Amino acid sequence: MIDRRTFGTVLGTGAAAVSLSGLPGAPTASAAPRGTSPVPVAGGAFPRLRQIRAGLLDVGYAEVGPAHGPVVVCLHGWPYDIHSFAGVAPLLAARGYRVIVPYLRGHGTTRFLSDRTFRNAQQSAVALDIVALMDALKIGKAVLAGFDWGSRTADIIAALWPERCRALVSVSGYLITDVKANLQPQAAKSEYTWWYQYYFATERGRLAMEDRDRRRDLTRLVWEQVSPTWDFDDVTFDRTAAAFDNPDYAAIVIHNYRWRLGIADGERRYDDLEKRLAARPFIAVPTLTLDAGRDPFTAPGNGSGYRDRFTGAYEHRTLTGVGHNVPQEAPEAFARAVVDADHLAVPSPS
């Protein structure tokens, strides 16, 4: 457990230039104690990636912080990658957390072990990837923290395998998908926001995602639309867009959105899990949910629409002026949410 009374000294450091050398009482990256992983450099990149075979994948991931610290697994969304957490990871590592940031299937250096494996991106398959990664790294339990696809993945693990989840940080709250419910139309403004989901349902959309230049144009447009106050530069976008050159990227993205619309099949081996998820299972692990005030996907009601799904210790926050990519736009707030969710997991002394 991390002392949040001292965490404010970390959160006062500018996120764009955070490194362990800039935090009170923390070692520099070059002088890190034995068993400590390197931290992201000031420019926002992870200096070294690791690979490990886990389940169906050879997973690429960044690891930051002491090897024996309490574990936080940070999960990115679409169209993003591990660099959404480049500002969050050193803040947590400086407070003693071991931070694991994996590329999801189809992204970055993560690869399928077999060419014969169906490039499936249904929600239960992606969640099982993370469980397999934890197994491969011999991590029994971790704080799971994510946004977008990452929130959905963390929600699923918390719901179906709560013994693996010490606490949960979920941007946009409860994102577990019920495909049948998704067949019902939403309000016109909501449907408009999801334009790319419907584009991906067409062959035009598939061809665009397979073309590197069109893919980059499309994903950059999404960044601009869903994060209207985030003034990112070309270097920041290009760093992440490199993860989209994964040979399976287009297939994974297209399958994910088509599956969620009910126009692409999943695999029979996941049917039982999907039935459980379609029932909207409760999440009992300690949870802190975040809503982004400038994210067009944020539902009205300050989290009230999903509050009943969380039955354990719970806290909700709305981040004013922040768009969809919460950890990269507001790394201090996201890191604080992780620490505070971890405190929810610890009973107060009587």
Image (cartoon, helix red, strand yellow):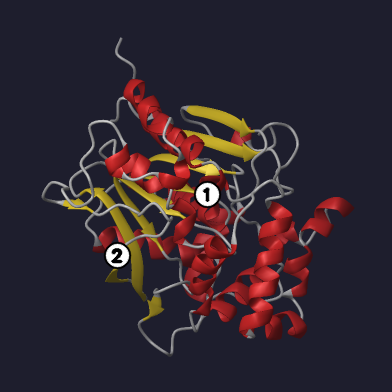
Q: Residue at x 21, y 57 (%)?
A: 138
Q: For numbered disc 2, what is the local secondary structure?
A: loop
Q: Residue at x 86, y 51 (%)?
A: 189
Q: Quadrant of the N terminus?
A: top left
Residue 24: percent from left, percent from top: 28, 31
Residue 238: percent from left, percent from top: 54, 69
Residue 176: percent from left, percent from top: 59, 52
Query: Is 117 left or right of 254, judged from the image as shown?
Result: left
Residue type marked 2: Arg
Q: Which residue is mark 2?
A: 48
Q: Which residue is mark 1?
A: 328
Q: Is residue 144 visible?
A: no
Estimate the spatial distance between the alpha carbons at disc 1 and disc 2, rounded to whole Å. Answer: 19 Å
Q: Residue at x 51, y 55 (%)?
A: 150
Residue 235: percent from left, percent from top: 53, 64
Please give the count of numbered marks on the rendered protein: 2
Q: Name the foreground residue: 79 vs 31.
A: 31
In this view, which residue lies farthest toward the top? 350
Query: Is 59 left or right of 26, judged from the image as shown?
Result: right
Q: Sequence order check: which comes first, mark 1 or mark 2?
A: 2
Q: Residues within 10 Å of mark 1 (few under 14, many from 20)?
A: many
In this view, which residue lies farthest toward the left? 34
Residue type marked 1: Gln
Query: Is 115 left or right of 187, judged from the image as shown?
Result: left
Q: Is residue 242 visible?
A: yes
Relative height, residue 185 to residue 169 (above, below): below
Q: Quadrant of the C terminus?
A: top left
Relative height, residue 88 to residue 221 (above, below): above
